[in-house]
Image: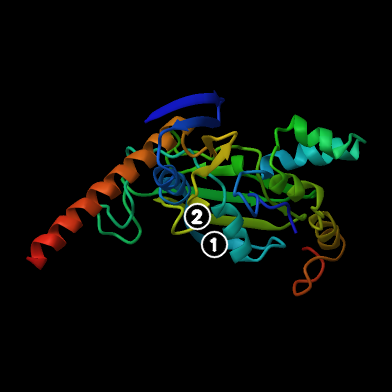
């Protein structure tokens, strides 16, 4: 089994897989799309919204913004020891969005999201994402809760994309990160998940065989 | 109404490239070339740009002139 890096840049890697079973390559592909943990806005508290967009559409747009994910220091909310629905310092990052248009229309960008703790590492991947345009005199004020999640729960947590394909009899795996995590980290995370899943399956099979005897 | 934040098909982030795409195309550059420059390479993401209609501008203009229907002219 051999892996060769054919090309790579800041956000993507192309690997040539030699002697790797297609099923394993596919498992890695699926893990990248579905299971790599990353961070996005999960809950929105709307305090005021007089913008042309209804609350739920605005909330949906905000939730799709990728945040640079510090998955080493943050837990999944459902696995966190705090057992609190609102979350604690180990499972939630709070943000505030406050914007108001004066005499002229104002475009609200992702850079206008203000973290509760100014030194947090969890920030929007890009500051230039337009969220909404406020006509004169209109305002939005909301509180945002950024949490860890997986792509299988909602596509906003899809960390990247991966495709497995054959060209000239060779098998390639192309992986691209959306910015939540560096590509290499994302791929390693996916491989770790596949390995854990395979080990789990082995244990369950052993249990089943032992019970059947 | 506004340009979507992620590509509908692949999920890649595209919204941050929208404003430079729009201003450059309005200035007369060919859309295909602008998209190449912005590194929008997959055709699922490219169609998001070339098929987008920005209605938001008109909505904002309407709000500016007439205010929200239930509130009346902007206070």
Q: Is residue A50 left or right of residue A145?
A: right
Residue A212 appears left or right of B68 = left
Residue A207 lies in what quarter of the image? bottom left
Residue A145 lies, in percent from the top left, at 45, 53
The residue drawn where x is 54% and y is 40% is A124
- What residue lies at 54% left-to-right and 62% top-to-bottom? A46
Label 1: which secondary element: strand
Question: Which colour style is shown?
Answer: rainbow
Note whether residue A182 is visible: no
Q: Residue at x 68, y 45 (%)?
A: B15
Above or below B11: residue A73: above
Q: Which mark is residue A143?
A: 2
Image position, residue A45 (x, y; %): 50, 61
Residue of label 1: A47
Q: Is residue A210 above or below residue A121?
A: below
Q: Name the residue furthest bottom.
A: B70
Q: Are marks 1 and 2 in contact (CB under 8 Å)?
A: yes
Mark identifier at residue A132: none
Q: Quadrant of residue A204?
A: bottom left
């Amino acid at each position: 089994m051999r892996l060769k890096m054919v090309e790579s840049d800041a956000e993507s890697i192309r690997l040539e897989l030699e002697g790797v079973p297609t099923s394993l390559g596919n498992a890695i592909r699926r893990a990248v799309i579905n299971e790599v943990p990353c961070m996005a806005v999960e809950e929105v508290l709307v305090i005021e919204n007089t913008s042309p967009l209804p609350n739920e559409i605005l909330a949906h747009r905000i939730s799709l913004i990728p945040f640079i994910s510090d998955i080493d220091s943050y837990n999944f909310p459902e696995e966190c020891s705090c057992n609190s629905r609102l979350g604690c310092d180990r499972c939630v990052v709070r943000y505030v969005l406050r914007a108001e248009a004066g005499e002229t229309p104002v475009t609200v960008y992702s850079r206008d999201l203000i973290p509760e703790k100014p030194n947090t590492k969890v920030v929007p991947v890009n500051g230039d994402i337009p969220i909404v345009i406020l006509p004169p005199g209109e305002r939005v004020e909301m509180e945002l809760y950024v949490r860890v999640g997986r792509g299988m729960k909602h596509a906003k947590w899809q960390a990247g994309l991966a495709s497995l394909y054959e060209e000239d009899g060779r098998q390639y795996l192309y992986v691209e990160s959306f910015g939540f995590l560096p590509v290499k980290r994302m791929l390693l995370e996916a491989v770790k998940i596949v390995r854990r899943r395979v080990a789990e399956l082995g244990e369950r099979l052993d249990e089943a065989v032992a019970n059947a005897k | 109404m506004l340009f979507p934040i992620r590509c509908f098909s692949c999920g890649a982030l595209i919204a941050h490239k929208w404003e430079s795409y729009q201003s450059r195309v309005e200035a007369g550059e060919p859309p295909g070339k602008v998209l190449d420059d912005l590194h929008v390479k997959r055709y699922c993401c490219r169609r998001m740009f070339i098929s987008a209609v920005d209605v938001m501008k008109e909505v904002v203009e309407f709000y500016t002139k007439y205010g929200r229907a239930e509130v009346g002219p902007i206070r």
